[in-house]
Image (cartoon, grey):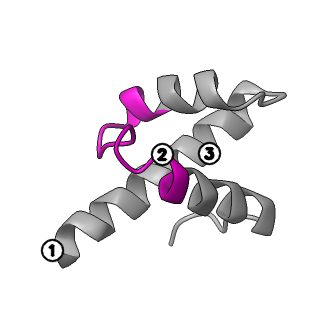
């Protein structure tokens, strides 16, 4: 089983995917750059968690289509 994401991480990730749908991809490294430029995240770890969750959401979205 994977790690459980906090409500804050999920809320931020969902918001980022909705508002920046065209900029986020299924590539984690690219998403880290986009999230780093769009958000003022206090730590590298939280930025990576948000980017990872957003990547996972984009992969699931792509799988549906």
> Which span is picked out in magenta?
17-31
Looking at this view, name the residue that lies furthest to the bottom: 64
Residue 27: image location, x then y, percent: 30, 37
Residue 35 badge? none
Q: Earlier in the sequence, mark 3 or mark 1?
A: 3
Asked if disc 2 and disc 1 are in contact, CB closer than 8 Å, the reply is: no
Residue 13 figure quarter: bottom right
| Residue drawn at the location 59% of the way across and 36% of the way down | 48
Residue 17: image location, x then y, percent: 49, 55
Q: Is label 2 or label 1 in front?
A: 2
Q: Is residue 20 above or below residue 17?
A: above
Regarding residue 53, the answer to whether it shows in the image is: no
User: Is 64 placed left or right of 42 in the picture?
Assistant: left
Q: Secondary structure at mark 3?
A: helix
Asked whether residue 54 is drawn in magenta, I would say no
Q: Earlier in the sequence, mark 2 or mark 1?
A: 2
Q: Is residue 19 above or below residue 23?
A: below
| Residue drawn at the location 84% of the way across and 28% of the way down | 42
| Residue drawn at the location 61% of the way across and 46% of the way down | 50
| In-front residue for pair 59/22 | 22
Looking at this view, name the residue that lies furthest to the left: 65
| In-front residue for pair 65/1 | 65
Q: Which residue is mark 3?
A: 49
Residue 65 badge? 1
Q: Earlier in the sequence, mark 3 or mark 2?
A: 2
Residue 20 badge? 2
């Amino acid at each position: 089983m994977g790690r459980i994401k906090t409500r804050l991480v999920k809320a931020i990730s969902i918001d980022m995917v909705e508002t920046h749908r065209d900029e986020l991809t299924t590539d984690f490294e690219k998403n880290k750059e986009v999230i780093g430029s769009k958000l003022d995240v206090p730590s590298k770890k939280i930025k990576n968690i948000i980017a990872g969750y957003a990547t996972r959401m984009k992969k699931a979205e792509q799988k549906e289509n």
